[in-house]
Image: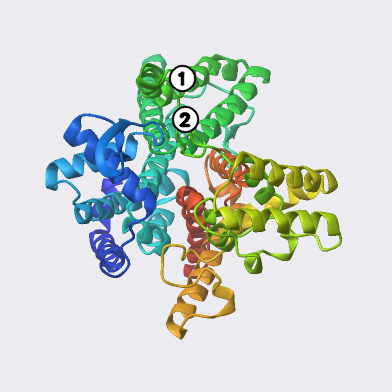
Amino acid sequence: MLKLIREHRGFFLCATLAALALRLSFFVYFPEITDDSRVYADLATNWLQHGIYGQTVTVNGQPGTKVMPADTRLPGYPAFLAAIFWLFGPGNLKAVLLTQILVDLATCLIVADLTRRAVSDRAARIAFVAAALCPFLANYTAAELTETLSIFFTALALDCAVAALNRMYPAGTGICAETGVPSAVSGQALGHSSGQSSGQSSGQSSRQLWAASGAAIAACIMLRPDGGLLLSAVGIYLGMLAAKHLFTKNNAWKKNLADVLVAGVIVAALALAPLVPWTIRNFRTFHRFQPLAPRYANDADELIPRGFIRWVKTWMIDYASVEEIYWSVPDGKIDTAKLPSRAIDDSNPAEKAATLAVIADFNDLQDITPELDARFGKIAAERVRAHPVRYYFLLPVLRVADMWLRPRTEILPPDVRWWEFNDDTDLSAMAVGFGLLGLAYVGTALLGLARRPSGIRWAGLLVTFLLVRSAFLGTMENPEPRYTLECYPVVILCAAAYLAKRDRAAAI
């Protein structure tokens, strides 16, 4: 990558300055501090000042009087904040956001390097510009949330994995570029074409790269539990690669089976290693087995409204309902006027009456009691029995589509109901523009996969990651567009592969 930068200094300098200007504009005009941000900052401050990884709680009506150990959030992002607070002062969120800008600029370079390894130098330059000018990545640098770091380590893990695969299977050794799966090869074993010492050197360097990939995945996991999806994707792909080695009739391939298995062990061991002390700490402190963080970021004595959540999953498909309905519980009221028609079945009077009654009772209490939650759960169970295909297949697909395709303005001023055009002209234009830009990124990436799969090495690994993450997101009841941002390094790579081909054709 350094060679490519030296050869195109002016290009990379101009693109970097443009990237910096874009991110600074979000920093100045649209900084975002959410409730999650305050939780992370509290954890970091207490860890730094009191040596306790915990949250400040209220005692006898006096806020901020005691720090209690917590396991509701993994320690990756609080550790990052604590380091910034130690360097620049407690609570210095401006320093956090400026640091995230630098991290995201590094992400642009990593995405370019990943594209260079998987496609070409020309595609790498396109990918760098696409990442540098991507407002979706830039936007979250101005938010005190985990997204920027998660995207960085995701891109780094994939870059190291592709680099390791390239070392194990050099070009011209029979690799199927379209899928990244070995094909039948005649001749010398892969990775050993230059003699035994060369093969040993290649194997050693590839193991170092697999270790780096595993360490990056570990960082993803320690930032958010869903970082483990990347480990699953790499594991699935290496499993397919090992199966190809195992069942091939070519003896040369069988000799490399051990390399693939060792790669899987290295990645898994490094990725999961940080969870060992975290799990031990949680067991000693809370006397329960908690290797990640609770699914709903809840305290042990906090009621999880599983019945309500299941009811929501019987109709939820869009982010607008997340803000207006899902986040209203348990501290607000449910506005039935904002419920989509699919949430209440008019053709079933008994269900409609039961739904409106339980919502009315909740609005009176403004709290979810076990009895109310059980009533929501009963309605949900009846809806699932009546429409199992809709619940288990159609709604998850629609939730994933919403996360991928809706305008990514959830932490920007445009109204969540952007399609009603209730905002002023500028905000409405922003929402429409972001929506069209998102369609352009995703659409071009799909063209790259459809028309240029043979031009993307290890496309199988990249597509596996996209599919695994999307499938998991479909199981969630709250379709938030930010959950697909970790996929954007792959989206940009595939889009660059398509544009690089188009650019070459135009030049000819």
Between 288 and 144, the one lying in front of the other is 288
Residue furthest toward the bottom? 425
Helix, strand, or loop for circle 1?
loop
Mark 1: few/some/many CA within 10 Å (<14, 14-19, 20+): few
In the rendered view, would you say 136 is above or below 229? below
Residue at horizontal 52 percent and vertical 66 percent from the top:
407
Per the image, the residue denoted by label 1 is 288
Instruction: State the residue in front, 305 or 173.
Output: 305
How far apart are the two marked residues, 2 and 1, measured between alpha carbons?
Answer: 10 Å
Q: Earlier in the sequence, mark 2 or mark 1?
A: 1
Q: Give 457 or 54, whichever is nearer the viewer.
A: 54
What colour-coding does the image apply? rainbow
Q: Position of residue 288 (x, y in %)?
A: 46, 19
- x%, y% of residue 195? 41, 17
Q: Is residue 343 above or below residue 40?
A: below
Task: Identify which residue, 285 or 136, lies in the foreground.
Answer: 285
Could you tell me if residue 93 is visible in this image? yes
Q: Quadrant of residue 177?
A: top right
Residue 388 numbered mark, or none: none
Residue found 78% across the figure and 50% down from its top: 390
Is residue 479 something that shows in the picture?
A: no
Query: How many callouts does the rendering have?
Result: 2
Determine the residue positioned at 34% across, 50% down.
Answer: 37
Q: Which residue is mark 2?
A: 300
Residue shown at the point (48%, 63%) measured from the top left: 408
Q: What amino acid is labelled 1 in the image?
A: Arg
- Marks 2 and 1 in Cβ contact (< 8 Å): yes
Q: Is residue 242 left or right of residue 105?
A: right
Q: Three-letter amino acid code at disc 2?
A: Ala
Residue 24: where, in percent of width, then height? 26, 65
